[in-house]
Every structure is written in structure tokens, then in C-alpha cells.
Image: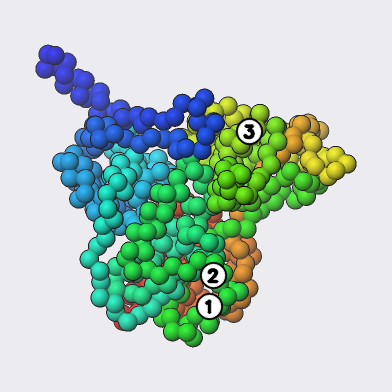
């Protein structure tokens, strides 16, 4: 190839990201295996070579946990994969998870210089590559720290809690994590389907954190088993609350209590944590009819819709009160859902549900909407169009319009300031609550947000706890 033509091709490759292979839509709608297959070594090297290694990397500023992104990518180009994952884990204890579910396009990759003219470097896919490569080998952990005599209780084994636990364990703290469910992971295990985040990946990340010396106590519902006051009296020097947002919101329209109408929480917990998709091998069945409507436009709504399709629904329709452009879900997930045959009814909002004599849902009346002025989220506010009601035949409905914190801890802890929605009020710089030695982070302190933002708040809280206990 002539040198000029070779240089032109290299320049063109610089602006185009290496695509990642995935299961074909016709295949994947019949299984719960992971859709995205990850990079091969050849693909990872080609993608890593696109990084400009900027002297002032904006991508790092876009990362809520401040991973040194250019450094780990440069190590990939040098074939130093073990060093690359060690570099990532200096700041991120859950890289295989983040590489799969973080909205990199709205965070680190949003600030990539290459993205101004072409495709941003696929940072998340490269993070997944080195994390998955590490998981094929025996578990390696940092050199154990000498215990410093301080104890910290972490409530909730989701992304925020696991991050706090890992960061403090590395600093020599005795950390005990209390988890209400029978397995660790929080939303990572009960909220995200197997085809997006395999449970073995979550378990491997949890095993790494336990290997740091963290003690995990499952089936431990704080607020019922112990109160926060009792934990502090028992000898813990600090408590971190990372219990997430597990209380579903509902529409509040007539007929919402009919059989066949699920909250997304119940539906996904049954499918993911209790493995209903493997019934009768796992003995938690779940009924999905032929015509399914999913209410909402976020990742949870798409996860519910795609799960329902895999469980045998003949048609699945996403009903969202705004337009496609306002959907908060990741674009990649929207495209995957559309490829799989999920249909969408945009600018529509349910007004009531209809049922039969046995109390099962048979129909959903919805009203057409139009977009008005932007609301507090920055998106245009949907306004109903009077007289535009239409009835859709359905036999299963999944409501995925958001979640708020479970109030158990808040109601059993005196002096803990919360909002009217049960969100714990904290100092945004430190994560400290209104109580001494009590910190909070993740969805319980912010409302529903991303996995990586929960981890970011966990890192802040861990840093603050350490500073407070070493004064």
C-alpha cells in the first residue's frame, strides 16, 4: 500500500471506534446469555491505539471515581494487561461491572477529544476487556493491610456499599457489610438482567472485596435486626448507609391493583435474583402473558421489556410519556431493544387499567401527550391532550417509573434528616448525614442514579470516614 494511502487509512481508523460483537437478535431473544461479547485481544489493542494520551485528559474528569484512563489504556497498548487492571483497581473495585453497565457515553467518553470529530475511545469496553481477562486467572488482591483497630459498619452490599467497604479495607479498617438479601450485589443482582450483567461477574467482584478482609453478613435487615444506634453502641466507629432505592413508585390510576400488573422491582427480582427464567429448575415461577406493556423509558423499563420478551411474550410495547429523544435509557440499550422487536408507544400515558371477572388485567387506557416547556430535569414536560384516550389490549403490565428509598432505616433512626421521599440528606462533599459518625451514599442519598455515581459517592464517604477517624 502506498505510504500516503496507508496514512489516510490510519487517520480514518483514528476517528472510528472498533465495534464490539454481540449475539444476533433472532438468537438472543430466546436466551438469557450475555448479549455483548466483549473485545478480543486484537480488537482491544486496535481500540486502545486510538487514544491520544492527552496531557490534560478530560476523560478522567468525567469519571465519577477518577480512574487514570490514559494510563490504563497505554498499558493495554504495551500488552501489559495485568498492570492495566491494577491501574484501574487503584480507583475502581468493580471494573468488570462498570465496563458493562456504566453510561460511559455520558461520563468519561463524553469528554474524549476524539469524540468532537469522530467516535470517542471505547473506554468502557477496554475496561471490561482487562477486567474479564483478570477473571480468567486466580484471584489476586493487594497486599493485606495491618488492621488499625477501627470498625466500620456498611449497610447494603450494592455498588456504594461495596466501594466503601473495599476502600476502607485497603486502609486497614475492619469492615462488616450487612445485606438484607441472601446474596450481595444489590441492584447489580436483583435489578440488571443476566443478558446485560451475568451474576458470575458480580460474584467475582464481590469475592475480590471479601478477599480484602471485608466481612459480609447476608439476611441482615438493619432497622429490624439492629438499629444504627445499636451498631454504634456495639463498638462500630462509623456507619455507612448504602441501601439504595428499592421502593417502587406507582402510577396511582384506577385498576392498578389488578392481577397481571407488576412493579418492575418485583418482576426483575423474580427474574434475576430468583432465576424465574430457569423455572422449574429454580422454583420461582413468574407469569408473562402474550401482550405485555411496560410503562417507562429508562434502563429498568428496557430491562423489564427485554426480559418479558425472553420469557415468551408475543409482543412487548414500551409506553413512554415523552418522545424517544427524551428517554433516559442508554442509547445502546434502546438500539438492542429495537433490534429485538420491542415496539414503543411514545407520547402516551396510562389513565386506567381494565380487568375481567377474575380480576386479571385485560386492557390499558392511555391518553396522548404533547411536549410543553422543560421541567426541572431539563426535558420538556409532557402535557395530556384532552379527549385522546385509546384502549390497548394487554394481559401483562410492568410499571417501571422509578423507585425511592425503603424507609425502614430512616424510620428507626432518630435525628436522621431526610426529604419527604425518604432520601437521606448528606453533605455532598463528604457524605456525612445529620448524625455524627453516620454517612450515606448512592441512591439512598441521591435518588435513583447510575452504578458509577453510587460508587463515586461511596469513595467520597470512605475518604471522609478515614479522615474523621484519623484526626
Q: Determine which residue is flagged by label 1.
A: 228
Between the C-alphas of marks 1 and 3, the distance is 44 Å
Residue 125 sits in which quadrant?
A: top left
Q: Is residue 214 left or right of residue 196?
A: left
Of labels 2 and 1, the one closer to you = 2
Q: Determine which residue is flagged by label 2.
A: 220
Image position of 152 with respect to 360: above or below: below
> Which element is circle 2 on?
loop
Task: Residue at 17% x, 15% y: name it.
Answer: 5
Task: Residue at 68% x, 39% y: name it.
Answer: 288
In the current view of this chain or complex, which residue is farthest to the front?
A: 281
Tell me the tag on residue 312: 3
Give the x, y percent position of residue 186. Answer: 50, 57
Q: Pick the quarter of the image with the C terminus.
A: bottom left
Residue 118 sits in which quadrant?
A: top left
Query: In front: 14, or 277?
Result: 277
Amino acid at each position: 500500500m502506498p505510504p500516503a494511502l496507508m496514512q489516510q487509512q490510519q487517520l480514518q481508523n483514528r476517528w472510528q471506534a472498533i465495534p464490539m460483537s454481540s449475539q444476533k437478535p433472532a438468537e438472543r431473544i430466546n436466551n438469557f446469555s450475555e448479549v455483548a461479547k466483549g473485545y478480543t485481544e486484537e480488537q482491544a489493542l486496535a481500540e486502545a491505539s486510538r487514544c491520544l494520551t492527552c496531557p490534560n485528559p478530560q476523560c478522567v474528569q468525567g469519571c465519577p471515581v477518577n480512574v487514570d484512563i490514559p494510563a490504563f489504556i497505554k498499558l493495554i497498548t504495551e500488552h501489559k494487561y495485568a498492570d492495566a487492571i491494577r491501574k484501574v483497581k487503584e480507583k475502581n473495585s468493580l471494573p468488570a461491572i462498570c465496563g458493562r453497565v456504566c453510561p460511559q457515553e455520558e461520563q468519561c467518553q463524553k469528554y474524549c477529544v476524539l469524540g468532537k470529530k469522530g467516535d470517542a475511545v471505547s473506554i468502557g469496553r477496554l475496561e471490561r476487556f482487562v477486567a474479564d481477562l483478570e477473571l480468567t486467572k486466580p484471584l489476586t488482591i493487594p497486599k493485606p493491610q495491618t488492621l488499625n483497630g477501627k470498625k466500620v459498619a456498611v449497610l447494603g452490599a450494592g455498588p456504594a456499599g461495596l466501594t466503601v467497604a473495599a476502600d476502607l479495607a485497603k486502609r486497614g479498617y475492619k469492615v462488616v457489610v450487612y445485606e438484607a438479601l441472601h446474596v450481595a450485589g444489590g441492584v447489580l443482582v436483583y435489578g440488571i438482567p443476566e443478558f446485560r450483567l451475568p451474576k458470575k461477574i458480580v460474584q467475582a467482584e464481590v469475592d475480590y472485596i471479601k478477599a480484602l478482609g471485608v466481612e459480609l453478613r447476608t439476611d441482615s435487615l438493619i432497622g429490624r435486626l439492629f438499629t444504627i444506634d445499636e451498631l454504634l453502641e456495639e463498638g462500630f466507629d462509623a456507619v455507612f448507609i448504602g441501601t439504595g432505592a428499592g421502593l417502587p413508585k406507582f402510577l396511582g390510576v384506577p385498576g392498578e391493583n389488578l392481577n397481571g400488573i407488576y412493579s418492575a422491582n418485583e418482576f426483575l427480582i423474580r427474574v434475576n435474583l430468583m432465576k424465574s427464567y430457569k423455572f422449574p429448575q429454580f422454583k420461582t415461577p413468574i407469569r408473562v402473558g402474550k401482550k405485555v406493556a411496560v410503562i417507562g423509558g429508562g434502563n429498568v423499563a428496557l430491562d423489564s421489556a427485554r426480559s418479558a420478551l425472553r420469557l415468551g411474550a408475543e409482543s412487548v410495547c414500551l409506553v413512554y410519556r415523552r418522545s424517544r429523544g427524551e428517554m433516559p435509557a442508554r442509547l445502546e440499550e434502546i438500539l438492542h431493544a429495537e433490534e429485538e422487536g420491542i415496539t414503543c408507544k411514545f407520547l402516551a400515558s396510562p389513565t386506567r387499567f381494565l380487568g375481567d371477572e377474575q380480576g386479571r388485567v385485560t386492557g390499558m387506557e392511555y391518553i396522548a401527550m404533547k411536549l410543553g416547556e422543560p421541567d426541572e430535569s431539563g426535558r420538556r414536560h409532557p402535557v395530556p391532550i384532552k379527549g385522546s384516550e385509546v384502549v390497548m389490549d394487554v394481559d401483562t403490565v410492568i410499571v417501571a417509573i422509578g423507585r425511592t428509598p425503603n424507609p425502614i432505616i430512616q424510620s428507626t433512626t432518630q435525628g436522621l434528616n431526610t426529604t419527604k421521599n425518604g432520601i437521606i440528606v448528606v453533605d455532598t462533599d463528604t457524605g456525612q448525614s445529620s448524625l455524627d459518625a453516620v454517612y450515606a451514599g448512592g441512591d439512598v442519598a441521591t435518588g435513583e442514579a447510575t452504578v458509577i455515581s453510587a460508587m463515586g459517592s461511596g469513595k467520597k464517604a470512605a475518604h471522609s470516614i478515614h479522615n474523621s477517624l484519623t484526626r
